Amino acid sequence: MTNDDILNIFFLECEEALAAAETGLMDCREGSASAETVNSIFRSVHSIKGGAGAFGFTALQAFTHKFETVLSFVREGQLPLGEALNGLMLRAFDLLTDHVSAARGEADTPDDTAVSADLEAMAARAEAGEGAEEEAPVAEEIPAPVEDILLDFDLDSLLGDIGGEESSAAEAAPEMGPELDIDALFDAEMAAAEASLAPESDAAPADNDSADWTVLVRPRAGAMANGGDPLLLLRELEALGGKCTAVHHNHVPELADFDAANAYLGFVFQVPASVDEDAIRDIFDFVGDDCGLEVIRGDAGDGFAKMMAPEPEKLVREERPIVAPVAAPVTIAAPAAAPVKVAAPVAAPTPVAVVAKAAPAAPTPATPVAAAPSPAAKPAVTPENAAADAARKATVASGQTIRVDLAKLDRLIDTVGELVIAQAMMAQSLSEHGLGQIDEIGMLDQLTRELQDSAMSIRAQPIGSVFSRVPRIVRELETETGKRVRLEVSGEQTELDKTVVERLGEPLTHLIRNAIDHGLESTETRIANGKSPEGVVKLSAEHRSGKILISIADDGAGINRERVFSKAVEKGLIAPDAQLTDEEIDNLIFAPGFSTAAVVSNISGRGVGMDVVRQNVKDLGGRITIQSNPGRGSVFTLALPLTLAISDGMIVQVGDQTLVVPLTHVVESLRPSTSDLRSMGNGRNMLDVRGTFLPIIELAKPIGAQGAALRPEEAVLIVVETEDAGSAILMVDAILDQRQFVIKSLETNYRPVPCVAGATILGDGKVALILDVDTLVGSAVSYNGGVRLAA
Amino acid sequence: MISLSADLDRTNVASLAHEGAEVLASGVGALTFDGSAVTRVRLCAVQMLASAARSAATAGVAFSVEQPTAELVAAVRLCGLSDLILPSAGSAVQ
């Protein structure tokens, strides 16, 4: 692994950390944050800071430090959440995002002067004990979090990977069941220590400042992975003047049960008072939650003794000693051979307190060993919030992921595509030999489809990665427009192909900006119209009928059709006397250069957005539709394919050509009766489909097929719908099949062909062209003299 | 006597733990490690030696690390486990 690889992984980790932080910040804003929410934000920012420092991104590191300082005060209850603080944290988050982009070389380093000053001022207020300007309501107080530092960015793992030390073994090492028990025990012990030390701190603050640090260190299995070695951390503590005063070793198993990948020991170090706390914590920056850490100002001996004192009423006793006090250092005379002097005998075994781990997010202290509730206000937490936290944790815990080179994935997809083709060819070949009905064919077909689904699902990503950028856009637009907007997001976990996800960002951004800038009325207008002053934008995604539907809905004024119509006439897009349906008028907004905005702003109004949106969606093989109700708002719906590689289609015969019509366009197929047909002259025909006349397109002509049916009465008609040319009818000789097909790019393998979206290989090995229905119908309708609605 | 390898990485430690367990299972009267070759120590090695000491005590056999190097002694001391792992004060060699 090269440094660039590691850097890329760092940036991926940054993305994940930013996403987690933003989710948490939005919870804070909505008043649904729990203590774990704040912890999660802190961890995210802290992990970015750690990586930034390692890679030399000083501006990023400096800013995250300021942000983190404020978050630490929030976490400790010294800064209660409120509107001002939430606003500051969101602004800081946006700048943090910009800093990360700058570190990636994608943008200039942002000017964080103002936000930095605000963060420092907020931190100063907290230090002065003034708190934030206003306080958030506190539903229930909870114990302070036991685990103080939990990092996500595993730089040690990466650095270990460079050296190739034990990486494979580490990756293969399972998380051991007993590790959980050990963690639970040690966490509880740490909590007890914290509880026992806290009163002392309160009682004698002046003396406490000069007291040594007590540092409790509990490495976990993850700290031993990928070449990591907690011993290095202890050595750094030692370099600061720290000395191990006690060690937990009663969790060390017998040799027969020993697992070299697991961590069993816990340490208590005494570090001189003169050492800065940050210097101690910095040592553990990169091990994250792989190493429990408590840094406590105070007398180690007393505090630790209290921690170890048995509490028979609540605790289970264990006979083995849990602590081996180190009475005096072992001396080594010189590098030359010398006896090791042990100054004191092993301490006598003492009864040991073993406690069950308190529920991490319980709304009330679960056991007396948990840390006492902080007297300061904590973020509001409710049982529901705690349950949600627990659910999130469970999701994270159960999700085990690996990173795979995208090229390998693409190769897999390609191979599966070839398999689909080969399977179809074999099935057809067997069928020609009278073996088409054998069971194995069905089994193979089923397995191939399952394999294909599995392969596709590997490339699938939650759409949440795109949705996550929307809250910031909304916040910015709120500021720019002065409108109040409530964003409601659902379906973030809906998965679709990675390529689709990556290319969805731009059209989605346009649509959100459009919804807020054009869709929502001003606050004053809304109030005057009897609406809530706060506009609502709903962003949702869902699977439906083999497609992904993404909708962007607003509760604004809806499309002003009169204005759109007059603007279209003004721009020469339509004739003044054109008779258009509401749907057709709505679709005019997708015309290039079309905009009804009276004022061109940096938000929208230049008319360069919606046609690009439509083109982007079309490029993804999808479609966009509008539903607008005057006074009630608009809904833009994007229908996208699950994947760009394989799609469903109707295989049709037109003369000597076999063609594929993508199913996304197909409405229905029918055989016409003569009475429903109308001739328009020049060989053009229309069909009356339940009261609507649709143009019939003889596919043989644009495709150049020979021997096709010449009369609609002799053909099969397929009703299709398109984005910008309305509905039409494709005239074919026969429908051969309906199946999934692997899309092969003509542009890549040949050259672009008008009205053809690509090609595929059929079961008989023949190449079939996939129709570009939008272009085909658009050009045919235009040729026929019809009105092109919005192009 | 079980010889501790120079680099006590996780693979070696796992192997040594297995070897130690077999020695104990064989019913010998002492579990002895030779620490004279050790140059690199990780936490897993210290844990293994602590595990060996505990297992030996459970089995009622003597446990010792002979001729621990300075690196091994320092690591054990750093972890506060000298009393458990190096109670017999074997010689430190360079």
Image (cartoon, coloured by chain):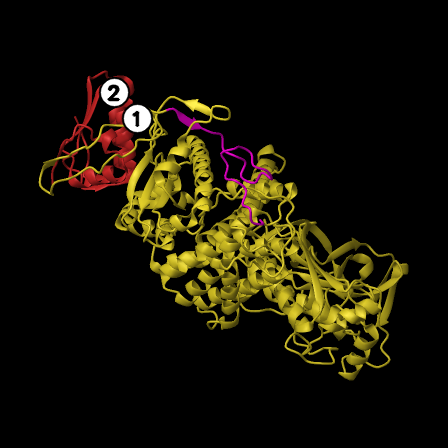
Residue A547 locus on image (x, y percent)? 67, 53
Rendered colour, chain A: yellow
**Within the image, what quadrant is residue A8 found in?**
bottom left
The kind of residue on which mark 1 rests is: Leu
Q: Chain of mark 1?
A: A
Can you give x and y, in whole percent of width and height, for residue A454 in the image? Answer: 55, 44
| Residue type (three-letter) at the residue carrying disc 2 | Leu
Residue B7 percent location from the top left of the image: 21, 40
Per the rendering, the mark at residue A255 is 1
Q: Is residue A128 left or right of residue A474?
A: left
* Circle 2: element type: helix
Please give the label number shown on residue A342.
none
Which of the two residues, A80 or A100, is positioned nearer the viewer here? Answer: A80
User: Residue at (39%, 59%) from the top-left corner?
Assistant: A7
Q: Is residue A769 left or right of residue A56?
A: right
- Which chain letter matches label 2? B
**Disc 2 to disc 1: CB gap under 8 Å:** yes
**Is residue A372 covered in magenta?**
yes
Name the residue that disc number 2 marks. B24
Q: Which residues are magenta?
A: A351-378
**In the picture, residue A669 is in which quadrant?**
bottom right
Chain B, hue in figure = red
Residue at mark 2 to residue at mark 1: CA–CA distance = 9 Å
Give the farthest residue toward the top.
B27
Task: Label the magenta part by its dominant secondary structure.
Answer: loop
